Amino acid sequence: TARVWQVAKGKCMRILKDASAAQVLCCCFQPLNENMIFTGNSKGFIQVYNLSTGILANKMCLQKVGGRVQTMCFDSSGFNLWVGDDK
């Protein structure tokens, strides 16, 4: 799972369960829409969740990379997502 915390109150606000039942290895917010969170998992999938509902934003937007997703980061424009995997 990925969890979003309200740090000041020590409260878990949202639990995001991986759609493919894999280990979530990294996550990042979409800088142009902070209601979208991207997760990367051990099966190589990048998934996009709606933070308000906790469900996949669009099942068609699941993307697979060559290996386990280790890190993700948007560029300064917010339009390009850089992904590092273990391959």
Image (cartoon, grey):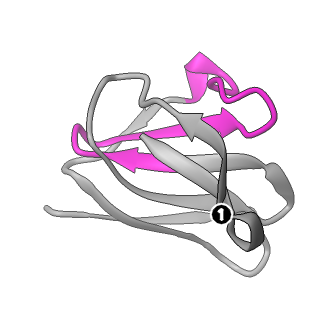
Question: To which residue does mark 1 refer?
Answer: 10
Above or below: residue 70 compared with residue 37: below
Above or below: residue 82 compared with residue 76: above
User: x%, y% of residue 26?
Assistant: 41, 59
Relative side of 41 to 9, left or right: left
Relative side of 31 to 71, left or right: right
User: x%, y% of residue 16?
Assistant: 54, 35
The residue shown at (82%, 56%) is 34
The quarter of the picture where the N terminus appears is: top left
The residue shown at (76%, 26%) is 53
Quadrant in the rendering for residue 15:
top right
Asked whether 74 or 8 is in front, the reply is 8
* Residue 44 lies in the magenta stretch: yes
Q: Which residues are magenta?
A: 39-61
Tag 1: residue type?
Gly
User: x%, y% of residue 81?
Assistant: 58, 62
The residue shown at (23%, 37%) is 43
Asked whether 11 or 15 is in front, the reply is 11
